Amino acid sequence: MVLRAALIFCSLCALFFPAAGASAQEKVIWVALSAEGGVYRQTATVLEQQLPGVRLQVRHWRDWVAQRSEAPDLMVAVGAEAMQRMADSMAAWPGVPLVALLVPRASVESVLRSNPSLRLTGVYLDQPFERQFQLIKRALPGRARVGVVLGPSSARYLSDLQRAAKSEGLILQIQTAMRKEEVAPALQAAMTDADVFLAVPDSVVFSSHMAQYVLIASYRAGLPLVGYSASLAKAGALASLHATPEQVGLQGAELIRRVLSKRGSVPPLQGPAGCEITVNENVSRVLGLPMDGPGLERTLCDQGGRP
């Protein structure tokens, strides 16, 4: 009887007080940030909230590049710089999946082309062209001629742009600028006779130095500019269609769960499921183009399904 009672007691102890080694099965995820705060930290916070069953370790990418401890189960890079730096260092952790968040589509696809053996996936920032043209069609009725300037990182999406514009009955006026000095004449040509200008993310056309120039050029021409980030709308675009850090974090958490549940190949890259519309009220008033941001958001973003 004493032995039997002891066995029962041990069984209960194992049930309610697991051995310290049980946590060894806990998944470990390294989260590398491009910068310590701002949208990068916001996205990481959402991951922490959505993934309570894993051990997330959040640091700046420099700390992880210098790290040579045992490899984690998965790595997350938040921001383009973190993605590039971690991808360059993945030889130290072969086979570990890398999930990229808050990155431009062109940047993550470029890393994949350069490193085809990487187990890389992610949620890129670029909104679907179809959704962008739907915004133009609904917010700016009667403005059918859309000016666009493509550069070296965005020119590969020309056919996607043309197909999406055609589906909405819009006419594209496309110019290309492969070098910084070509941006100004390309802008002038694209804006001539255009009704609206669509900003497409590109490392040359919308670099940190050129973005303000493009905004000023469109403003002087009295041409509404539709952007791809909240910062562009605040800087002078009429409106921007973009995903929030919270939306990317929610979608990223679901993608991470999928990656952890699989062995071998990782899921393909994803575009943002949700979106938000930021309207610059001052520009709207000056151009005489009132926009119902919340109403457009309900129509365009909710139909896409929030993650």
Image: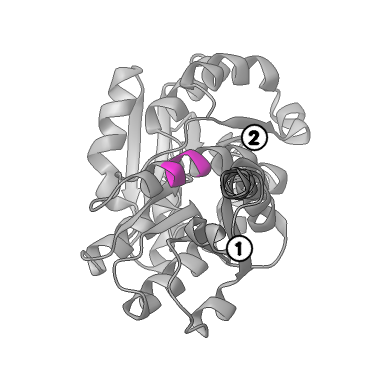
Helix or strand or loop: what does disc 2 sit on? loop
What type is the residue that disc 2 sits on? Leu
The image shows residue 229 at horizontal and vertical percentages of 59, 44
User: 15 or 159: nearer the eye?
Assistant: 15
State the image coordinates of residue 203 (x, y, percent, origin top left).
44, 62
Q: Does residue 78 appear in the picture of this structure?
A: no
Q: Earlier in the sequence, mark 1 or mark 2?
A: 1
Magenta stretch bounds:
253-257
Q: Nearer the viewer, mark 1 or mark 2?
A: 1
In the picture, measured across the screen, residue 173 lies left or right of residue 239, that is left
**Residue toward you, 38 or 180:** 38
**Apparent side of residue 242 relative to residue 272 in the rendered image (left or right):** right
Place residue 58 in its image quadrant.
bottom right
Q: Which quadrant of the figure contains the N terminus? A: top right
Q: Note whether residue 9 is visible.
A: yes
User: What predominant SS class does the magenta segment belong to?
Assistant: helix
Whether 255 is among the magenta residues is yes
Residue identifier under label 1: 20
- Tell me the number on the disc at residue 238: 2
Tell me the residue at 25%/69% (across/down).
114
- Give above or below for 62 relative to 75: below
- In the orientation shown, which residue stands out farthest toward the front? 1
The stretch drawn in magenta includes residue 43: no
Using the numbered discs, state the Cα–Cα distance from disc 1 to disc 2 in whole angstroms.
57 Å
- Neighbourhood count class around disc 1 (C-alpha, 10 Å): few under 14, some 14–19, many 20 upward: few
Neighbour class for label 2 at 10 Å: few (<14), some, many (≥20)?
A: many
